[in-house]
Image: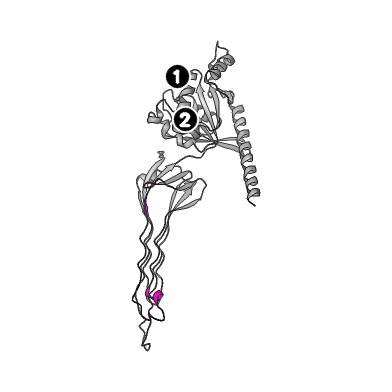
Amino acid sequence: MKFVDEARIIVESGKGGNGIVSFRREKYIPFGGPDGGDGGDGGDVYLVADSNLNTLVDFRHSRFFKAENGEGGKSKERTGKKGDNLYIHVPVGTIAYDMETDEILADLVQSEQVQIVAKGGFHGLGNARFKSSVNRAPRECTPGTEAEKRELKLELKVLADVGLLGLPNAGKSTLIRAISAARPKVANYPFTTLHPHLGVVSIAPHRSFVVADIPGVIKGAAEGAGLGIQFLKHITRTRLLLHLVDLYPWDGTEEPVKAIATIENELHRFTEDLAKKERWLVLNKVDMNTDQDIEAYTKSICEAVNWKGKVFFISALTGAGCKELTYQIMDYLENVSLLNKENVITDENISS
């Protein structure tokens, strides 16, 4: 299926039903009073996070969604039927923006999460509502309020624990194939990956994490060059970034030091929050080392870029070092989750 991570739709709630003017007319009851009923409320429009969906492609064909209008009031003080609500199913990880105000209306990060995006119109009042001791026969009613219409931009950010970051052909797709069951395309040319891939890495029963492989980022991506900048938003939700660097690039165009600097520069230009996220340096293709002292070579790289974080040496092709990397990732994610739980408990104690 084609991966689509952005779409624009128009949603409209239901209009509120009008109240009516009506008087009781029954045989043998000469002085019937007002009995005009209220209208029904218009239907609301909701977005629903659906774990069975993984793309916004359906919204390229269906762009207008409208909830049902409320029915008008009826005689004998009968209320009109409320309009049915409309539920629009979207993938988990979808953010909905109001195109006019740029306000975030919904951020759906959990399966079956529901969020209203257009409120239905309020019902009109029938003349029975206006009866009083000084106005026995009111001829007044109110119309239902108008529907709410909005143009929304839907943006899908895939949900993953770990994001793979690097230049084209750094070995990201090969790595995700080596550590998970995901099977992205692998080939010896740039931009082999055209859309994000998710892979589940299972360490042991009840110990697993999700890793995302995105298209490679190139110099000038912040100005729209290449493909990766279109998908950097997908790794803004991740808890850990793996910065994959090719020690021996096949075309020799980007030396490791320059490759690291290119990615760091684009991260800062995209958003400072992403640049500050926990990031580990993963040096790939250690199996290709022949005469060079790999430790001295990698040490010189880290010194050249002033790298202070964790560094791993792997071969995505042979799997060397991958198992240790995944165990370290799992331990880190579990520690982060434990720390977050402790912070939540502390906050609850303070508030109580």
Q: Which mark is residue 254?
A: 1
Residue 130 is left or right of residue 207, and the answer is: left
Q: Find residue 32 and report its horizontal and vertical position in percent.
A: 37, 84
Q: Is residue 309 left or right of 9 when viewed as pictured?
A: right
Q: Earlier in the sequence, mark 1 or mark 2?
A: 1
Q: Amino acid at mark 1?
A: Glu
Q: Position of residue 336 (x, y in %)?
A: 61, 37
Q: Which residue is mark 2?
A: 268
State the predominant SS element of the stretch in magenta. Answer: loop
- Tell me which amino acid carries mark 2: His
Q: Is residue 144 magenta?
A: yes
Residue 95 picture quarter: top left
Q: Position of residue 301 (x, y in %)?
A: 53, 18
Could you tell me which quadrant the N terminus lies in? Answer: top left
Does 148 lie within the magenta span?
Answer: yes
Q: Which residues are magenta?
A: 123-152
Which element carries disc 2, helix, strand or loop?
helix
Query: Which residue is nearer to you in this view: 222 or 165?
Result: 222
Judge whether residue 55 can be spotted in this image. no
Query: Which image quadrant for residue 294?
Result: top right
Nearer to us in this view, 60 or 18: 18
149 vs 325: above or below: below
How far is mark 1 from mark 2, CA to CA? Answer: 19 Å
Farthest residue, direction front = 134
